[in-house]
């Protein structure tokens, strides 16, 4: 028999606070199972792929309208795509009357899906203050964010996000919150 293909899982882990890693690598494929060999050897199963995300991540379907999973606690794990089943080899169909069968069945293909990951947590730190207090300037100085900076009030109409990187494994998100919304 052929080996079963690996599954694709998503797991909420501690120590992550952004989905920035999935910005650059967007396609994940679990390992396929190996073929069955001679001497009645069964093929090995494929390794699973585990996508590690921060707690507070939602998994949405391709249309971005249905929530398939909501990982709110560290350690939660959900299967996103099931691996294919290995085919049945001729040894599976052996009987006392047919000791050398010439029959086999192909395996089933695994699932293939397009999904969206959305983080519900907007930021670890929020900058709050009056208009023209320098919140956007501070955000642009401590991160690579490029918020709109101007010399008139109410420049920031929507929250701007920036990632502050303090070294390996030490980063956090800062949000520039609008001071007041005019009107």
Image (cartoon, grey):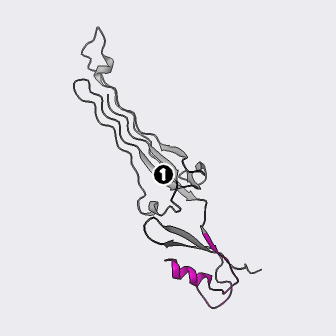
Residue at the location (59% across, 67% down)? 124
Secondary element at image label 1? loop
- The residue at the far bottom in this view is 151
Magenta stretch: give its range.
125-154
Residue at the location (59% across, 82% down)? 136
Q: Is residue 146 visible?
A: no
Total numbered badges shown on the rendered structure: 1
- The residue at the far left in this view is 38
Question: What is the crowding at mark 1: few (fewer than 14 residues within 10 Å), some, or many (at least 20)?
Answer: few
Residue at the location (70% across, 83% down)? 130
Quick check: 130 left or right of 10?
right
Quick check: 124 left or right of 131?
left
Front position in the image: 28 or 45: 45
Quick check: 110 left or right of 74?
left
Does the magenta portion include 131? yes
Report the residue marked by disc 1.
114
Residue at the location (63% across, 91% down)? 151
Front position in the image: 100 or 180: 180
User: Which corner quadrant holds the C terminus?
Assistant: bottom right
- The residue at the far right in this view is 183
């Amino acid at each position: 028999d052929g080996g079963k293909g690996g599954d694709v899982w998503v797991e909420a882990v501690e120590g992550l606070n952004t989905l920035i890693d999935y910005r650059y690598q967007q396609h994940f494929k679990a390992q396929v199972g190996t073929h069955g060999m001679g001497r009645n050897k069964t093929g090995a199963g494929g390794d699973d792929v585990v996508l590690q995300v921060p707690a507070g991540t939602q998994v949405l379907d391709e249309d971005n309208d249905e929530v398939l999973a909501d990982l709110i606690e560290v350690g939660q794990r959900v299967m996103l795509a099931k691996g294919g089943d290995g085919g049945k080899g001729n040894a599976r169909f052996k009987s006392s009357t047919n000791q050398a069968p010439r029959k086999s069945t192909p395996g089933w293909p695994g699932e293939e899906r397009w999904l969206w990951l959305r983080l519900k947590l907007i930021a670890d730190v929020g900058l709050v203050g009056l208009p023209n207090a320098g919140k956007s300037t501070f955000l642009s100085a401590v991160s690579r964010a490029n918020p709109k900076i101007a010399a008139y009030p109410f420049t920031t109409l929507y929250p701007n996000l920036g990632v502050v990187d303090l070294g390996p494994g030490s980063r956090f998100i800062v949000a520039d919150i609008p001071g007041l919304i005019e009107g």
